[in-house]
Image (spheres, rainbow, N blue to C red):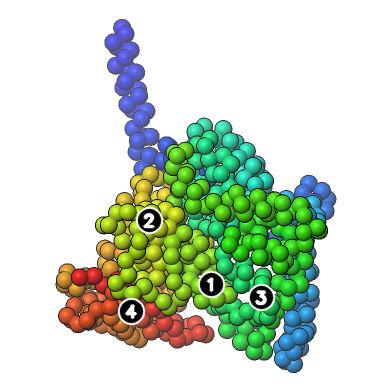
Amino acid sequence: MKKLLCVLLCAILLVASVPFAAAAEDEPAADALPVILIPGLCENALIRDKGEKSESQIWFPIKAVMRGLLRHTGELLADIIKQDVDALGELAVNFVYEVAEPIRLNPDGSSYYDVSPVVSTAEESSYNALKKSGKLALVTYGTSTLKAVADEIGGDKAFVFQYDWRMSPFGIAEDLHTFIQDVKALTGSEQVNISGTSFGSEILATYLYLYGEEGDLHRVLMNSPAYAGSRIFREMMAAEEPTHIDYEGALNNLLGNYGVELELGYLLKLLPEGAADRIVYEVVDRFIKTYYLPSVSFWGVCPHEDYEEMKALLLDPVENAEMIEEADRVQYEVVANIREILQGAKNYGTDVCIIMNEGCRLLTSHGSGDLLVDAANGTGGECLEIGEHFADDYAPERLVCADENHDHVSFAGSLDLTNGYLPENTWVFYGQMHGQNYWDANARPLTLKLLTTDEITDVHSDPAFPQFRENAMAVSDVLIEIKDRPSAVLSPADGSVTAVVRNLSHIYPQRIKSITLDGIPYTLDRDALLLMPGMTAEITLTPTGGEAKKYGSLTIEYDEVFNIKLHKSRTQYFEVVE
Ligand SMILES: [Zn+2]
């Protein structure tokens, strides 16, 4: 009888498991850990007077911006026609006061108004909960990275942590601690994977410092990390006269966050010469230095070596005493110890990975990074200015990675990660803008794999995800990579290779007019082609036996059809080895 029951039971289980097994192909992995995403400064929505009749969204201030633009259009046009730089500066400052006034802080660092994030508990912050409450579009990454993670592991396991980004990373890390315990309870998981973008990485570093030994974090992904600050802080805040800013890059980055491919930088050419720089200078000098300066988080992105000097220059030891005490703690306990914090995480069983960028000039200077954070601070490595390259005989002193077989120098010969924070766990995308992983077709699969699987443990795990790679953002228009070999290394001894030319744009056809090689001893079988949006073409590169540069370059000249800014070019670097 028992045997019969057993057979029956087995048969039932077998039949019952068939549909599940079949469905498992499309179902999210049941054993995947929950994933939490943390946005950066200014990135998540804030509301005023939560729960009151007067409740209103104050950030992102879309309504206020639209209202302000409508109100001031006449004045703006008149000032442009008159080419009146002073009046434009005044207009901009008043506009910013109008729009951003609700985020003002008291001199002690506390909020002037009653402000909170749109959602705060773990229960209301999963992808599914946000979808149900209709708040998905309000949270950063709601419709991009969070959705992509939810597609991989299920919407009940994908979370976004929202916070008041003006406050101290210590207080925010405390809230994150509660949030993580709640995520564990909600999902029944012992650990979580977590990613912080920009300032979100500083919150994670603070978390590791305070709570790392509790072992809640399986994997931490630091994305475009701002935990060691950015030299932009000094370049903007200590400037005594207007600094020249890369507006085109800034606009592309801003629009890129919404996946928008529209170049509006040329509109600034309507303004009188130097007006845009003057406007930014006035806004920093009069708005940021009064209403936003006491933000402890803001002081967390000041590089440690600049901190005391900037503090003496910008803060008042009496009026700002309370926030200075907290900012000191952030600087001396976290920012000054980033290397130790990141490297020490493995002692608690936490795997830390970094995705950073190089090759985009900083907004305020020729430093190399992703517009906002310099590559040296993000990775702990050595990074040259834009356009500079290490000498051909450059050999790094091996202090962190001692393995002679490892080459941690980028193919552009401008960034050396050998002595970085985590040379084996840092990936770098050349030319990618700040926090654009999701919009970069080369970075997105890596990000998702790191967050939702254990398939990749370091930069040596999978040749499809090399340490250094060109970006493939839609706004970068065109890209040439060697077929089946994403690492930008060419070896003439291997003979001819096939390269894939991709039109990265989703809307513009690209007419490639020429491809010029400098120090790359190959010939191309064709260098003129028309590619429709999203299309690829193959070209053959054949070695010529000519002289190679160690860090050679390839420049594509192309017209972006139907775009006002028609003629463009992109330069890519290739390391040429024997
Ligand atoms: Zn190494």
- Image point (77%, 62%), residue name: 316
Q: Callout 2: helix, strand or loop?
A: loop
Depth check, mark 4 against mark 3: the one in front is 3
N-terminal of the two: label 2 or label 1? Answer: 1
Q: Which residue is mark 1?
A: 362
- Lateral position of residue 134 relative to residue 349, left or right: right
Report if the beta carbon of the residue with label 2 is closer than 8 angstroms to ligand 1: no
Q: Quadrant of the C terminus?
A: bottom left
Frontmost residue, 21 versus 114: 114
Q: Is residue 78 above or below residue 380?
A: below
N-terminal of the two: label 2 or label 4? Answer: 2
Within 10 angstroms of label 1, few (less than 14), some, or many (20 or more) residues? many
Q: Callout 1: helix, strand or loop?
A: loop
N-terminal of the two: label 4 or label 3? Answer: 3
Say which amino acid is labelled 3: Ala
Q: Which residue is mark 3?
A: 239
Say which amino acid is labelled 4: Leu
Q: Are marks 4 and 3 in contact (CB under 8 Å)?
A: no
- Image point (33%, 12%), residue name: 5
Q: Position of residue 265 (x, y in %)?
A: 57, 80
